[in-house]
Image (cartoon, coloured by chain):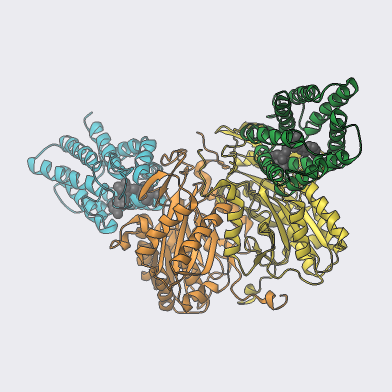
Chain colours: A cyan, B orange, C yellow, D green
């Protein structure tokens, strides 16, 4: 499958730009339960991704995703960077397989990415991580695929699911820190990694609608 | 951007710091192909187990500062508070491998674990035997029963000391792992933060901590602790940290320990000694004997104010390994033999 | 009182700090009759010139931290930023006098000078020969031509090293004085402050320095400097400090120097190395060769943020004295001989 | 000469209390050109002085002043503490000499103290130190002595002179720090040591008026 100029590469570009322009917000969210660097890390990932896109204009989807994964692993090896890289690398394999294309392929790619990310990061659904967002996105995409929605419709639904999942993390306990005596700093704020996923998907869905 | 830092481009923070370190200590350290990979000038040492560490920047002397004689052999240096890449860890691994295998010794943070694990797989595929010991000494980072989820803080200094001394003796990888695990299993730490720190590339404190307050159990990146409240006297702080630490292992009447009182960055050494004074008093009244003492900055968080206390339960073997000499540009211990007492050296 | 400090009663700051230090380092240090007088555990060393230092607290490792092998023999510890009394200095003098006379080596501050001078008179009356060398390395504290009015800052670390090494060799008081004076005359320093510090007993910053500003040339107690302005990059800071330092002596093309980059307290070691990187670059382009490098906290001002740069012009004798080993609980240098390079130690 | 209970000892007590209760202000003034500890130091001197007074209720003036000087030297050995101690020790010798008593003795004691302080501290008049205040006080007391003023009148005039001298220091350059490029922090603020002298003398003069 060849990456259409407005297709995969275009989506990745839009997602990268959206994430990069949310640097301060992602730092802020990561600061409540973590170390406040998610925006910095993801900006580095976005830069790496855009360099790959520029250097691989004619690449197949499989090669493109694999190159993105490798670049992110090299240039943004934080927790989230490594996990996102893992997701890209595994998704690359899926899009390389023969299959239905369109929404079905997208659903399969996200499903594979989620599995790989969970295998690597050992987080379960409900642990207040990006995995919660991925889970919601996968469910949504599978539903859209079964229902025969268009790619644009599926992306919109997936973005909405990611936003809702992000909002839901605001009520969850982070797994680190005992927070036994006083309310936790993170309570009431969504997980930063989940928010990053939602920002990326919303931008892609908005762009797809043009 | 109100950031009171002596830096140039915030994004060059790590690379310029590394350039400075290598320019200052060319006889002790050299860089590998990747400028973020630094090893002992004499690496690899044939027949010696290599020790590789690494993690995010902003914690000097952790991690880079423990590359030296009797400590670690190589380090992969990440961005501020971010893991190095698996490629960098792999390069450090190759550089220090002297044929006797390599120990990965670092803090239990998810980004680091993933990248070290990935590197370990790649190294094994190249025929380099790799074993891993994690520092997970922060009792505030996860409750009892979830020890494997705990993060590593300043106690790692004592693990470097133990692992490095055993490796320097010519022990096998299994023996180095055994000694380091023995130390890690008797090591517990907890800290208190009195101010946040500012990541150079972010330019903002990662959280608010109003003056007059403290957060007990805060992580070295500012991860939430167990309690935030009014700043209390050093004696009360020592009591609270030790209450958590002692009951956690637990350390018992009759135990012998090494104590490490660590400054997080902005807290003056004077305060660390005031804190140590209380720590020692409380341990004495608990029947726990302090056999070795380390007070200073062993793991920092940029300019964060605060301190942590670590206890390491000692047996004769661990005490001896702690007493061996070590030397890096950042951490020197001459060792327990004090020849000058016997009349000059 | 918004003071982010790990202390108990602010008025007990110095005494509790001292208790902590003595509890932590009983094999290295002992106190005299007066709890504010601390000497090497093995003092007096018969036949060796004794070196007594002292001054206000709040500057660790200055002054107490330089009591050790190859450094000073005893210290009189004042309150925060205040001189010790002449009685205390005299007691330190008696405790370290090994029959070969005593060198007073401390910073040029009026309170200290008066009390050391008074003690010197009393000691001489007891038959103890005393000589004095002052650290007066801060070029920002008084203009050229008024060198005698200048104050001592972090450069004193290098003077301890030189004086202590010479004394440890068994040199006479006159020889120790000569070497120390030779070092002092080629020593220049200047600092930059990025934040004030808070005296425990005062509870307030001694001055305001808004975020985003710096003060070039500020003294280690916050005495006004030569220029206040917007915080600049490390490279610009290095340029300005070195411009003043180099033209002052002046250091010339072809000179060899030791460089000391010192942190004032809150500034992370990472930043000190970033600063050193620029210092080294500028010196290289000025034809001044860096032969020895010290980067770290050698003289602090509680939790003040900032750094200073010192240059010491070297000849062979001074280089050799700098290379001798030294060891206190706070400052260790193993010396230039590196036996492990020749195959283990 | 025996120290009257409302006489020398009373004056010293009043002065000590006034200085001790100005701790914060003296710290603040010292902070502009110095290290911000003058109040702390002088509070320690005041405590030492009051202990001496309590332990020496029946002492002669000479012995009392000497004991005060020794105690201050021991317990407040900063610059100002050492200088004040020096002044006390030298003044003790003068009040022990046979002489006119009253204003004349007071003038002689201050004169001797000033000389000793200058000999020890090497500061000249105009260097923006406590010496400037002492100089003004000595001139005033000598004038009052020649004019035959009462002790209370002489103290009032001396206190006024000290206050005026203190105000004048606000316009002087401190001798330390080049302050070459921007206005100095200390400019516009009086010297802290001088202010301390004025505070002490004003309290004594006010008390003497009762
Ligand atoms: N074990 C894990 N599995 C999946 N996601 C995780 C895991 N740990 C953290 N995350 C996600 O990563 C985000 C933080 O990423 P990042 O700031 O890069 O981490 P760090 O700074 O700790 O390296 C979190 O908000 C969370 O969504
Ligand atoms: N050489 C000197 N001679 C006379 N008075 C001095 C001298 N140096 C300082 N002072 C006075 O001492 C005051 C500061 O005293 P103090 O705070 O005790 O000094 P430090 O903190 O430097 O020991 C100044 O305000 C000034 O009046
Ligand atoms: Mg983070
Ligand atoms: Mg991080
Ligand atoms: Mg002072
Ligand atoms: Mg002062």
Image quadrant occupied by the C terminus of chain A: top left
**Above or below — where is C112 with respect to B161?**
above
Q: Is residue C146 left or right of residue A11?
A: right
**Above or below — where is C159 with respect to D171?**
below
Q: In the rendering, at what x and y percent does residue D6 appear?
A: 73, 33
Pick the residue in front: B218 or A125. Answer: B218
**Above or below — where is C164 with respect to A138?**
below
Observer able to see residue C313: no
**Above or below — where is D68 with respect to B60?**
above
Observer able to see residue A150: yes
Q: In the rendering, at what x and y percent does residue B87 appear?
A: 42, 59
Quarter of the image where one finds residue A22: top left
Which residue appears at 23% of the width and 34% of the height?
Answer: A205
Q: In the rendering, at what x and y percent does residue D195 appear?
A: 72, 29
Single out the residue that lies furthest toward the left: A147
Quarter of the image where one finds residue B112: bottom left
Q: Is residue A3 left or right of residue C202?
A: left
Which residue appears at 36% of the width and 70% of the height?
Answer: B125
Pick the residue in front: A52 or A192. Answer: A192
Q: In the rendering, at what x and y percent does residue A18 appear?
A: 33, 35
Pick the residue in front: B277 or D49. Answer: D49
Marker count (numbered): 0
């Amino acid at each position: 499958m060849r990456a259409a100029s407005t297709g995969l590469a275009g989506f990745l570009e839009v997602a990268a730009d959206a994430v990069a322009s949310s640097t301060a917000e992602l730092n802020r969210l990561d600061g409540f339960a973590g170390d406040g660097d998610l925006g910095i890390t993801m900006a580095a990932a976005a830069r790496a991704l855009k360099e790959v896109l520029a250097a691989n204009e004619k690449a197949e989807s499989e090669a493109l995703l694999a190159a993105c994964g490798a670049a992110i692993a090299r240039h943004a090896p934080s927790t989230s960077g490594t996990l996102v890289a893992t997701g890209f690398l595994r998704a690359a394999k899926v899009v390389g397989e023969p299959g239905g294309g369109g929404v079905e392929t997208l659903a399969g790619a996200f499903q594979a990415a989620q599995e790989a990310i969970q295998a690597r990061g050992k987080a379960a659904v409900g642990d207040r991580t990006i995995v919660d967002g991925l889970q919601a996105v996968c469910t949504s995409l599978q539903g859209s695929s079964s229902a025969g929605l268009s790619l644009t419709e599926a992306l919109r639904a997936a973005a909405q699911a990611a936003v809702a999942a992000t909002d839901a993390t605001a009520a969850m306990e982070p797994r680190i820190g005992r927070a036994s005596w006083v309310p936790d700093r993170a309570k009431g704020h969504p997980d930063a990694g989940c928010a990053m996923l939602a920002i990326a998907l919303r931008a892609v869905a908005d762009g797809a609608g043009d | 951007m109100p950031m009171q830092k002596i830096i140039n481009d915030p994004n060059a923070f790590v690379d310029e710091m590394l350039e400075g370190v290598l320019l200052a200590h060319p006889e002790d350290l050299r860089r590998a192909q990747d400028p973020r990979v630094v090893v002992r000038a004499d690496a690899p040492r044939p027949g010696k187990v290599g020790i590789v560490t690494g993690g995010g920047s902003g914690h000097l002397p952790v991690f880079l500062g423990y590359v030296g004689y009797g400590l670690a052999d190589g380090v992969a240096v990440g961005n501020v508070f971010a893991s190095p890449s698996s490629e960098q860890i792999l390069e450090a691994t190759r550089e220090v491998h002297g044929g006797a295998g390599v120990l990965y010794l670092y803090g239990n943070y998810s980004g680091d674990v993933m990248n070290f694990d990935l590197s370990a797989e790649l190294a094994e595929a190249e025929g380099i035997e790799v074993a891993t010991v994690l520092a997970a000494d922060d009792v505030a980072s996860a409750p009892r029963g979830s020890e494997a989820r705990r993060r590593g803080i300043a106690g790692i200094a004592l693990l470097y000391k133990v692992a490095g001394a055993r490796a320097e003796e010519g022990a096998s990888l299994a023996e180095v792992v055994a000694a380091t695990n023995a130390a890690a299993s008797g090591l517990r730490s907890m800290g208190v933060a009195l101010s946040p720190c500012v990541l150079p590339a972010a330019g903002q404190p990662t959280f608010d901590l109003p003056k007059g307050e403290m957060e007990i159990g805060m992580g070295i990146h500012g991860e939430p602790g167990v309690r935030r409240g009014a700043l209390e006297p050093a004696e009360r702080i020592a009591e609270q940290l030790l209450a958590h630490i002692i009951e956690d292992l637990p350390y018992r009447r009759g135990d012998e320990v090494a104590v490490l009182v660590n400054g997080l960055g902005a807290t003056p050494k004077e305060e660390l000694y005031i804190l140590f004074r209380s720590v020692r008093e409380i341990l004495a009244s608990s029947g726990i004997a302090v056999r070795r003492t380390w007070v200073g900055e062993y793991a920092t968080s940029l300019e964060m104010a605060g301190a942590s206390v670590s206890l390491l339960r000692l047996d004769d073997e661990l005490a001896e390994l702690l007493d061996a000499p070590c030397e890096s540009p950042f951490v020197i211990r001459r060792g327990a033999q004090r020849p000058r007492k016997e009349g000059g050296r």
